[in-house]
Image (tube, rainbow, N blue to C red):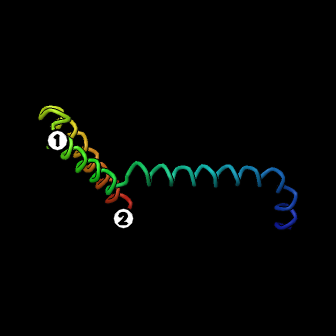
Amino acid sequence: MGLLIKLLLLPITAPLDGVLWLAETINDQAEQELYNEPAVRGQMVELELRLEMGEISEEEYQIGEDALLVQLRTIRAWQAARI
């Protein structure tokens, strides 16, 4: 009887299952982009290069570095919470 109910409810549950799968997939992709430690490290290197080339001031560098360090701490806390 459970199979019959599943078949009867399929037109209702299938679209919902599809939407849930899509939401989970989008969430996973967003987390991968948001919590991408190598990308943040790359931004730190780029920031340092811009300072050395004179494109930004020491103050701008410090502000950018502080923001990236906060982002790195957030990433590491997120990774620790997932374990």
Query: Is the residue marked by circle 1 packed among few (<14), some (14-19), or many (20+) residues within 10 Å?
Result: few
81 relative to 8 in the view: left or right: left
* Residue 75 spot, x, y in % from top left: 32, 52
Figure check: 6 above or below 77: below
Specify the label residue 83 is tagged with. 2
**Residue 82, x across and y down, in percent:** 38, 60
| Circle 1 residue | 53
- Is 69 positioned to the left or the right of 11 in the image? left
Q: Earlier in the sequence, mark 1 or mark 2?
A: 1
User: Disc 1 and disc 2: Cα gap in Å?
Assistant: 40 Å
Q: Residue at x 18, y 34 (%)?
A: 56
Tell whether 27 sits left or right of 62.
right
Q: Residue at x 86, y 67 (%)?
A: 1
User: Could you say which is closer to the camera, residue 5 or residue 76?
Assistant: 76
Q: Residues within 10 Å of mark 2 (few under 14, many from 20)?
A: few
In the rendered image, residue 79, in percent from the top left (x then y), is placed at: 34, 58
Numbered disc 1: secondary structure: loop
Give percent across and percent down for residue 18.
Answer: 70, 53
